[in-house]
Every structure is written in structure tokens, then in C-alpha cells.
Image (spheres, rainbow, N blue to C red):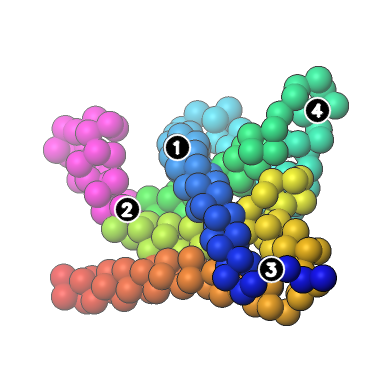
């Protein structure tokens, strides 16, 4: 018999939403750090680094996130490395996010006119000074909208972590559905919470993109 009120269902889903948000923040932060490192390696002139980043990006963009979660959780266990569902989910999502963020940021840097580099050399700036004072400030403005937009994909990607036993919003919804036998009500609430998480990020991305285009038109 169903002993859960609507408030009980919603309250439990909101409690699980904390872990969805936390996992998303960890994946985005870790992905940003690794992605930034990969970006600098990719735009370097060292063939080994460029080759490594290309393989890395192709690997994590070309395979399903679900498979990456399985490998991070079950694959490491086969190697004798005991990892929790938390660790496996954070690791897989971090690596997944880093491959896409690196590609976004590399594209933003390479979209700048080559004359920027040439002018910097004429001013006597070295590579690091050029990146710090000329290239990165301009690339940052272009990179913010797609970066914010990609954060939506990270939030949605956390739902797949339920397959390895990580109790986040989707997993909590499945557990509540098994207890209440009311799939429409439970998963309608789950969908609404995801919408409330993702919609502000989508709107922020659109706003920043429009603002950036307007700024460029007035330059």
C-alpha cells in the first residue's frame, strides 16, 4: 500500500537533488581544470602533446558516457582498485566534461585572428605574455556562453550515474517509484526538478551569447 504523500515524495527527491548538484559541480570543476590543461597541450607546438590530446578527446567524445561509468566503476574493480560509486561517477564525468570543454576552449582560441599573435610578437611579448594579456581575455568572452551551455549536459549526465548505484535524483525517483507504484507522479516530479536545474543555465547561455553578439556589433 502506498504510504507516501506527495510531500514525502517531493521531499525525498529534493534531498537527492543535493547530490545531483554536488556531483555536477565536482564534474564541472574537475573537467574545467583538466580541460584547461588539455587546451594548452593541444595548441602547443609539441607533436607528442597534440597527439595525446587528440586521442584523449576522440576517446571520451566518441564513447558513450554510460560505458565510461561502467569502466570507471567495474573496470577499476577488476584491476583490484576498489572505488565507490561516488568516486567512479565523479571520475567518469570529470573526464567526459574535460574532453568537451577542451574542444570548446581550443576552438575559441583558434577562432581569434592570427594577426593577434603576430602583433604580439612585434611588441616583444613572449608566449605566456601573449596568452595572458592578448589571447585569453578575448577568447574568454567567446567561451563563456558555450561553457555555460555545456553545464546543462553535465547536469543531465549525472542521471546516468544511477546505473552504478549512485543515489542522485534519477536513482531516488526509481526507488520511490518502486515503493509507491506511481511512476507518472514520481517521474513528473523528477522531470520538473531537472527542468528547474537546467532551464536557468540554458537561459544564461542564451543571454550571454546575445549580449556578446551585441557587443561585437558595436565594436
Residue closer to the observer: 17 or 177? 177
| Mark 4 neighbour class, 10 Å CA radius: few under 14, some 14 to 19, many 20 or more | few
Q: What SS does tag 3 mark?
A: loop
User: Is residue 28 located in the magenta-colored stretch of the structure?
Assistant: no
**What x and y, as percent, mark residue 49?**
54, 30
Residue 212 to residue 51: above or below: below
Residue drawn at the location 76% of the way across and 75% of the way down: 182
Farthest right residue in view: 78
The disc, 1 or 3, on the residue closer to the chain's N-terminal end is 3
Residue 4 circle label: 3
Residue 139 circle label: 2
Is the residue under label 4 in contact with that under label 3 (CB below 8 Å)?
no
Residue highlighted by disc 1: 33
Q: Which residues are magenta?
A: 111-140
Residue 181 circle label: none
Q: CA distance from mark 1 to mark 2?
A: 17 Å
Residue closer to the observer: 132 or 198? 198
Q: CA distance from mark 1 to mark 4?
A: 26 Å
The disc, 2 or 4, on the residue closer to the chain's N-terminal end is 4
Residue drawn at the location 20% of the way across and 41% of the way down: 133
**What x and y, as percent, mark residue 212?**
27, 69
Q: Nearer the viewer, mark 3 or mark 2?
A: 3
Residue 12 to residue 34: above or below: below
The disc, 1 or 4, on the residue closer to the chain's N-terminal end is 1
User: Is residue 126 located in the magenta-colored stretch of the structure?
Assistant: yes
Amino acid at each position: 500500500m502506498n504510504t507516501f504523500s506527495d510531500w514525502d515524495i517531493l521531499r525525498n527527491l529534493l534531498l537527492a537533488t543535493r547530490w545531483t548538484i554536488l556531483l555536477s559541480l565536482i564534474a564541472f570543476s574537475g573537467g574545467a581544470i583538466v580541460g584547461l590543461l588539455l587546451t594548452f597541450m593541444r595548441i602547443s607546438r609539441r607533436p607528442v602533446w597534440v597527439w595525446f590530446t587528440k586521442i584523449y578527446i576522440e576517446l571520451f567524445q566518441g564513447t558513450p558516457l554510460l560505458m565510461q561509468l561502467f569502466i570507471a566503476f567495474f573496470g577499476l574493480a577488476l584491476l583490484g582498485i576498489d572505488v565507490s560509486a561516488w568516486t567512479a561517477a565523479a571520475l567518469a564525468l570529470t573526464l567526459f566534461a574535460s574532453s568537451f570543454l577542451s574542444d570548446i576552449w581550443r576552438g575559441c582560441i583558434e577562432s581569434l585572428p592570427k594577426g593577434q599573435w603576430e602583433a604580439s610578437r612585434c611588441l616583444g611579448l613572449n608566449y605566456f605574455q601573449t596568452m595572458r594579456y592578448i589571447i585569453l581575455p578575448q577568447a574568454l568572452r567567446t567561451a563563456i556562453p558555450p561553457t555555460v551551455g555545456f553545464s546543462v549536459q553535465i547536469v543531465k549526465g549525472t542521471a546516468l550515474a544511477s546505473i552504478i548505484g549512485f543515489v542522485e535524483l534519477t536513482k531516488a525517483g526509481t526507488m520511490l517509484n518502486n515503493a509507491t507504484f506511481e511512476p507518472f507522479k514520481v517521474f513528473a516530479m523528477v522531470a520538473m526538478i531537472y527542468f528547474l536545474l537546467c532551464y536557468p543555465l540554458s537561459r544564461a547561455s542564451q543571454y550571454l551569447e546575445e549580449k556578446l553578439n551585441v557587443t561585437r556589433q558595436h565594436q
